Image: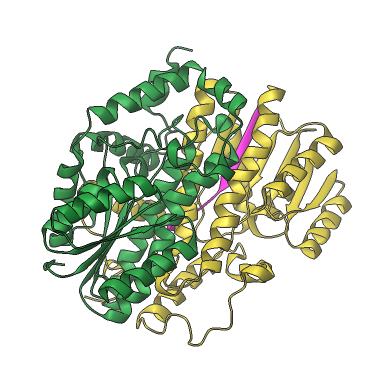
């Protein structure tokens, strides 16, 4: 897809982080924008801001982990704008907890939003795109640390991101073989201020954890240290706008893999080489030179 | 884990296929074995046959996609044998076709068994192992499909198998950081002579597809080609007992990755190269199924 004007974009997780930056960029390209988010208030604000800037906007409160919500989102999109050309699955939530302490709710919430969200989104919108038979693009926002390298204390997140990358790869290949007008890209940022560390605010009441008896990670002497490193990484300053620009370049160039941070390639290469050898996963602290 | 005699192993999906072979191999090493499977008849048969060989066996019908079923399995294991030392999250199914010919029921069933099975198995048994503080091993069955994205075979399969690799890698890191005595391995086989291509017998009633829809999908050439390929691949595949032998050795030597089919590694390498060189994904499968179209 090279021309965007007048086309219809749907963005999940659109009221914050990379989702919001993507929505703004779509509006700048004169696309009609469907904003979807679970956070009703933040969504209303995003819609207001975009409308004030002159964009054609539809806002739909959506829990992406519910298939019926994604079906409703697709229906409302077609009712309002009559077509869909770009789908960006940009929701993401995260827990920082050892697997040994992860609750069932942690697993259900993170896999439900990050993995099932994209599955339900694609299940709802792909048939429409296929029927339309026009140029379309699906963008899945994932990450290197999580999607191609399994960081400790990110169990549910890693599962969702490994899953999302392979799903995107299969979908790309299937569409290329049989519906080549529909393209797929993944963007894998790591060092960006996307607000994912604050994702707890949107955890539904039924998946909240009971107040813990002990502080999480207490059984592991390294937990606080590594948690600090991960948090600092996630707060590092790549503006989401820069990521949105990269996504649009990828759409124009029909480029599947997009790594905004070239340094993360070192991490990917190390993991892939380890699998091929094969050698057991490394103690991360050792790999980072923090312990001998 | 070096010593097996008298210790306790729980294996899911152990009424047939690789699970059954691993159960027998571990029993032969002197372990007490808990067989867990959703298929009652096959489970009864496996239990009877293994008991006839003189092994100590407990059989528990288990739907690994249900948290309460795993909790009950753990309770029955502890009630019968007082401890658990090795858990093999092995149960697996395959479902779906090309993404657009895959239903939400296919996703739910396949992710439920293949992905949630290991998640729930770890969620259930890991705290017990940590509390025991004895040498233990957590083992999960993934697949070569957990290292290379294979289009058209149904995306739930590779999504679940990549997910299992992710859990195991994360768990291995974390247990090392904690200094826990629990080893972790992930089993990634190619074709093995099991009934994985015919899992429909175990699909629950509430996850069935519309039969008319199913007929239409099955009539497509790519689906038929794949089905033949899968059936013949498994028929000519590795003997599950050979896989079991490799599993036992990996547990003994604390090897994380268990690759049984070195000849498949080339294909995994080509995915790796595509990622590192940022080339768009390709696979032999697409070429074989729709080449020249």
**At 38% across and 49% down in the image, what residue appears?**
B40
Tell me the colour chain B is drawn in: green
Is residue A136 located in the magenta-colored stretch of the structure?
A: yes
Location of the N terminus of chain A (image quadrant): top right
Residue A283 place in picture, x, y as percent: 27, 68
> Can residue A120 be seen at all in this image of the molecule?
yes
Residue B175 position by quadrant: bottom left
In this view, A222 is above or below B146 = below
Instruction: Using residue A254 as the reference point, say whether residue B185 is left or right of it.
Output: left
Tell me the colour chain A is drawn in: yellow
Is residue B257 located in the magenta-colored stretch of the structure?
A: no
The magenta stretch is: A134-149
In depth, the one of A264 and B137 nearer the eye is B137
* Residue sitting at the far top: B292
- The scheme the figure's colours follow is by chain
In this view, A80 is above or below B31 = above
Location of the C terminus of chain A (image quadrant): bottom left
Residue A130 place in picture, x, y as percent: 65, 26
Residue A46 place in picture, x, y as percent: 79, 57
Instruction: Using residue B203 as the reference point, say whether residue A273 is left or right of it.
Output: left
Q: How many marks?
A: 0
**At 50% across and 37% down in the image, what residue appears?**
A256
Residue B45 place in picture, x, y as percent: 28, 47
Instruction: Using residue A270 as the reference point, say whether residue A215 is left or right of it.
Output: right
In depth, the one of A216 and B108 nearer the eye is B108
In this view, A274 is above or below A139 = below
**At 83% across and 57% down in the image, what residue appears?**
A49
Residue A34 position by quadrant: top right
Residue A154 position by quadrant: bottom left
* Residue sitting at the far bottom: A213
């Amino acid at each position: 897809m090279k021309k965007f004007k007048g086309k219809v974009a749907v963005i999940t997780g659109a009221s914050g982080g990379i989702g919001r930056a993507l929505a703004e960029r779509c509006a700048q390209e004169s696309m009609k924008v469907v904003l979807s988010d679970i956070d009703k208030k933040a969504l209303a604000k995003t819609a207001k801001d975009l409308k004030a800037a002159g964009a054609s906007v539809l806002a739909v409160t959506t829990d992406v982990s519910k298939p019926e919500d994604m079906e409703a989102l697709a229906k409302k999109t077609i009712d309002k704008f009559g077509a869909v050309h770009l789908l960006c699955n940009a929701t993401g939530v995260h827990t920082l907890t050892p697997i040994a302490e992860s609750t069932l709710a942690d697993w259900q919430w993170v896999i439900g939003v990050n993995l099932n969200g994209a599955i339900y989104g694609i299940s709802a919108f792909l048939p429409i795109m296929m029927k339309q038979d026009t140029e379309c693009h699906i963008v899945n926002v994932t990450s290197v640390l999580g999607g191609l390298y399994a960081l400790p204390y990110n169990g549910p997140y890693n599962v969702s991101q490994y899953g999302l990358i392979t799903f995107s790869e299969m979908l790309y290949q299937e569409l290329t073989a049989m519906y080549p007008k529909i393209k797929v890209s993944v963007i894998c940022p790591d060092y960006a201020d996307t607000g994912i560390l604050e994702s707890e605010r949107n955890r539904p009441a039924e998946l909240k954890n009971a107040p813990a008896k002990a502080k999480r990670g207490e059984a592991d002497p390294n937990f606080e240290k590594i948690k600090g490193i991960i948090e600092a990484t996630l707060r590092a300053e790549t503006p989401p706008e820069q990521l949105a620009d990269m996504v649009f370049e990828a759409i124009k160039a029909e480029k599947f893999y997009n790594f905004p941070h070239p340094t993360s390639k070192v991490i990917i290469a190390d993991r892939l080489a380890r699998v091929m050898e094969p050698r057991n996963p490394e103690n991360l602290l050792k790999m980072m030179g923090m312990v001998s | 884990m070096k010593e097996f005699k008298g210790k306790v192993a729980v294996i899911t999906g152990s009424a047939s296929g690789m699970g059954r072979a691993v159960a027998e191999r571990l029993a032969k090493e002197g372990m007490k074995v808990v067989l867990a499977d959703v298929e009652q008849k096959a489970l009864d048969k496996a239990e009877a046959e293994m008991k006839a060989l003189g092994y100590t066996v407990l059989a528990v019908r288990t739907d690994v996609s249900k948290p309460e079923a795993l909790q009950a399995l753990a309770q029955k294991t502890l009630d019968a044998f007082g401890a658990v030392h090795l858990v093999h999250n092995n149960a697996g199914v395959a479902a779906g076709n090309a993404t657009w010919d895959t239903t939400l029921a296919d996703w739910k069933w396949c992710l439920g068994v293949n992905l949630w099975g290991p998640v729930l198995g770890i969620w259930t048994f890991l705290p017990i192992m940590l509390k025991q503080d004895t040498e233990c091993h957590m083992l999960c069955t993934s697949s070569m499909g957990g290292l290379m994205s294979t289009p058209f075979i149904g995306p739930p399969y590779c999504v679940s198998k990549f997910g299992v690799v992710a859990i195991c890698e994360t768990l291995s890191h974390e247990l090392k950081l904690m200094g826990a005595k629990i080893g972790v391995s992930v089993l990634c086989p190619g074709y093995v002579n099991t009934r994985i291509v015919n899992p429909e017998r175990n699909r629950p009633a509430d996850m069935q597809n519309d039969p008319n829809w199913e007929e239409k999908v099955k009539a497509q050439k790519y689906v038929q080609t794949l089905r033949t390929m899968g059936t013949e691949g498994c028929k000519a595949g590795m003997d599950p007992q050979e896989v079991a032998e490799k599993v036992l050795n990996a547990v003994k030597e604390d090897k994380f990755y268990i690759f049984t089919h070195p000849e498949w590694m080339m294909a995994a390498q080509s995915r790796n190269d595509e990622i590192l060189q940022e080339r768009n994904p390709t696979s032999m499968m697409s070429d074989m199924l729709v080449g020249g179209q």
